[in-house]
Image: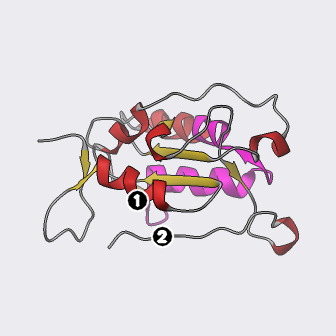
Amino acid sequence: MDSNRCTPPTAAEGWISNSDITKLLAAVPARQLILISDSCYSGSLTKEKNLADLSHVKRDALLKNRTVTAMSSGGNEPVSDEGKDGHSIFAWSLINTLKSGNTGAIGTSVWRKVRAEVTKAYPQQPQYGALPSAGHIEGGDYLFFSAKPEHRRVRARFFLLR
């Protein structure tokens, strides 16, 4: 099995290569971009570059450079689709972390909380990393903002691979 590919749940024709994914992300004209993948073997996307702890950096400085990151539910391994409230453990942990967090939470901090929650009960290891091949510029990290209108500072666009 080639671990440098992802399989969408409705894939009729096969795998999507990491190269195709990074090319697609590189073409998205956004300054802040994150790919969140809850699928087996998707951790290979996060291996390009680890992110430094930027919690001490002001949020406005993090928004200056293009940030392209990926968070996955596991590494180069199968991941569980069991969890809570109809979600996988990864999705449930991510949703609850975002609900309980403050606006402007740094991606690395969100990932650490999600990883801690997931690894309490499951052997999978959620991953997080930057994608320089898709245009990530050193010194940035993804910022999660609340969907509440009073917290909107960045307009988000969502893309679904079909």
State the residue at coordinates (41%, 53%).
Answer: 37
State the residue at coordinates (49%, 45%).
Answer: 71
36 or 31, nearer to the observer: 31
Q: Within the magenta stretch, is there residue 47?
A: no
State the residue at coordinates (73%, 69%).
Answer: 147
Instruction: Name the element at disc 1.
Output: helix
**CB within 8 Å, label 2 to label 1:** yes
80 or 61, nearer to the observer: 61
Amino acid type of the residue tagged 1 in the rendering: Leu
Q: Which residues are magenta?
A: 84-112
Q: Is residue 31 above or below residue 50?
A: below
Where does the image place residue 83, in percent across and percent down from the top left?
42, 54
119 or 42, nearer to the observer: 42
Disc 2 target residue: 159
Residue 56's mark?
none
Where does the image place residue 135, in percent across and percent down from the top left?
52, 45
| Cα–Cα gap, marks 2 and 1 | 10 Å
Instruction: Name the element at disc 2.
Output: loop
Is 89 on the left-hand or right-hand side of 42? right
Amino acid type of the residue tagged 2 in the rendering: Phe
Q: Quadrant of the N terminus?
A: top left
Residue 155 visible in the snapshot? yes
State the residue at coordinates (38%, 54%).
Answer: 23
Badge 2 or badge 1: first in the primary sequence: 1
Where does the image place residue 111, in percent across and percent down from the top left?
58, 40
Residue 24's mark?
1
Q: Within the magenta stretch, is there residue 96?
A: yes
Q: Quadrant of the C terminus?
A: bottom left
31 or 116, nearer to the observer: 31
| Disc number lying in front (2 or 1) | 1
Where does the image place residue 72, in percent across and percent down from the top left?
43, 45
